[in-house]
Image (tube, rainbow, N blue to C red):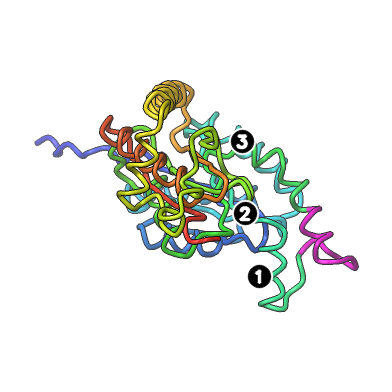
Amino acid sequence: MNSPATSPAPALKLAVITGLSGAGRSTAAKCLEDLGWFVVDNLPPTLIPAVVDLAARSNGGVDRVAVVVDVRSRGFSSDLHAVFEELERGGLHRPQLLFLEASDDVLVRRFDGVRRPHPLQGDGLLIDGIAKERELLRDLRGEADLVVDTGDLNVHDLRAKIAAAFEAEAATELHLSMVSFGYKHGLPVDADIVIDCRLLPNPHWVEDLRPLTGEDARVREYVFSQPGTAEFIDAATDLLRRYETGYVDEGKHYATIAIGCTGGRHRSVAVAAELARRLHADGIEVQLFHRDKERE
């Protein structure tokens, strides 16, 4: 009597969470854990293959593993590259790499709030440790699949970004975060593409529109009725569609698109929402964030 056929175990998915100390690695790990991932915190990179091997031996019991690595694992950057190469030689796809960061002032406030030293400051200042770590991680940041600036994100926003990138069943091949912002408040540091709306007439100079935001119908009507706006949005849509095709062809499935105006309250909010609507209609998963909508 033949034994019944068994279904092959699902392919193992591996994610690596890293980034600057104080940027929210533990929060990201908890988010993935809540999404059903098996998470290992503060794991030396050289032990990642052992964890992968144990997961593979579970016969599908563990099919998604996330590991958190940081500068407490000395030499972790070079070790991590060696591990990636080892895993690829073993037939496992390159892990998804999530990199978390925040501005210096945000990190300083967070460390001051918990009254802990930075792991790399030694006998120096807190800001020295942050600068040293930022330099150490520079190359790794450039290789990340998803870079997230957590400075302006609450826990719910961070969870939404991570869910879009790492959910087990993705609705589309490309996941976009569309964020409106104001140039006077600084560029979003995690932006892959930046589109400047400052060439469009500014509702700020219309007294009745100034206290409103780009989510108000009157502001949207003003912005979209201006000469050249329709052509601008059509061109931006076409550009982003070209990026969508190129990103997927190159294996990049997560990107942040930043849409900016002067203050981040009117033009960028309206344009970002319209671009998100059009791309969503194309079947692209888009999450919309308005970073500076409520700022003066």
Image position, residue 262 (x, y; %):
57, 45
Q: What type is the residue that disc 2 sits on?
A: Val
In the picture, the quarter occupied by the C terminus is bottom right
Q: What type is the residue that disc 3 sits on?
A: Glu
Q: Judging from the image, what secondary structure is the residue with disc 1 in?
A: helix
Dot 2, how many residues are within 10 Å of its Cα: few (below 14), some (14-19), or many (20+)?
Answer: many
Label number found at residue 69: 2
195 vs 74, nearest the viewer: 195
Q: What type is the residue that disc 1 sits on?
A: Arg
Image position, residue 281 (x, y; %):
25, 33
Dot 3, how many residues are within 10 Å of its Cα: few (below 14), some (14-19), or many (20+)?
Answer: few
In the picture, the quarter occupied by the N terminus is top left
293 vs 125, nearest the viewer: 293
Label number found at residue 110: 1
Q: Residue at x 38, y 52 (%)?
A: 163
State the separation of the CA atoms marked 3 and 1.
Answer: 26 Å
Task: Kindly identify which residue carries mark 3.
Answer: 143
Q: Nearer the viewer, mark 3 or mark 1?
A: 1
Quick check: 6 left or right of 230?
left
In the rendered structure, which segment of residues is drawn in magenta? 119-132
Q: Judging from the image, what secondary structure is the residue with disc 2 in?
A: loop
Q: In this view, does 111 lie above or below 33?
A: below
Q: Which of marks 2 and 3 is nearer the N terminus?
A: 2
Indicate the quadrant where residue 142 lies: top right
248 vs 81, nearest the viewer: 248
Res 56 seen here: no
Q: Residue at x 46, y 21 (%)?
A: 246
Q: Which of marks 1 and 2 is nearer the N terminus?
A: 2
State the separation of the CA atoms marked 1 and 2.
Answer: 20 Å
Q: Which of marks 2 and 3 is in front?
A: 3
